[in-house]
Amino acid sequence: MTRPAMDKAINGTSQTSMTTPEILERLNRARRFIDLCYDLPLDLEEISSHACFSRDHFLRLFRQAFNKTPHQYLTERRIERAKELLSTDELRVTDVCFEVGFQSLGSFSSLFHKSVGHAPITFREQSRQTQAAKRQVPGCFLVMYKLESA
């Protein structure tokens, strides 16, 4: 996408007082805030304040720039961290749920299933089986076929 087209897509016009790189930097600042504080109860007002935009304007700009809402991004971040915890830690699923910032086990389980395709407990079992299978294969083979990094 060309710069004028990007300006127009993000701002609705090609003549703005703020340039696209400035807007993207502010949006990225808010995204970094989500990345750092994903485990806390965040609301749109708090996130948008880190980008120095009004709530509704921020929501519009974020969606246009990243093709998802801040809430969708936050949920994805939480699910990714939950997958890491389920793969490596011995935490109970309920503990993982609260560790990544969800307030309800039901919401966590349904969002996890929708995103990953399996319930959290099923994901954990499959992850353990995959790790056990990898231990049966020589490391050089896994690296050679890019199943693991060197």
Image (cartoon, rainbow, N blue to C red):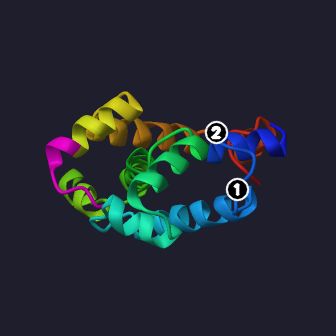
Q: Nearer the viewer, mark 1 or mark 2?
A: 1
Q: Residue furthest top?
A: 117
Identify the residue under disc 1: 16
Residue 79 horizontal/vertical position (percent): 39, 48
Q: Nearer the viewer, residue 114 or 17?
A: 17
Q: Residue at left 64%, top 39%?
A: 137
Identity, as a three-letter code, of the amino acid under mark 1: Thr
- How many C-alpha atoms fall within 10 Å of the one at disc 2: few (<14), some, or many (≥20)? few
Mark 1 vs 2: CB contact within 8 A: no
Left or right, 129 with reference to 63? left
Q: Which residues are magenta?
A: 101-107
The secondary structure type at the circle numbered 2 is: loop
Q: Quadrant of residue 91?
A: bottom left
Residue 58 horizontal/vertical position (percent): 48, 56
Q: Quadrant of residue 124?
A: top left
Membership of 105 in magenta stretch: yes
Identity, as a three-letter code, of the amino acid under mark 2: Val
Q: Residue at left 36%, top 51%?
A: 86
Left or right, 134 with reference to 147? left
Q: Residue at left 73%, top 47%?
A: 7
Q: Nearer the viewer, residue 122 or 6?
A: 6
Left or right, 36 with reference to 106? right
Spatial CA distance of label 1 from label 2 is 58 Å
Identify the residue under disc 2: 137
Q: Residue at left 49%, top 41%?
A: 68
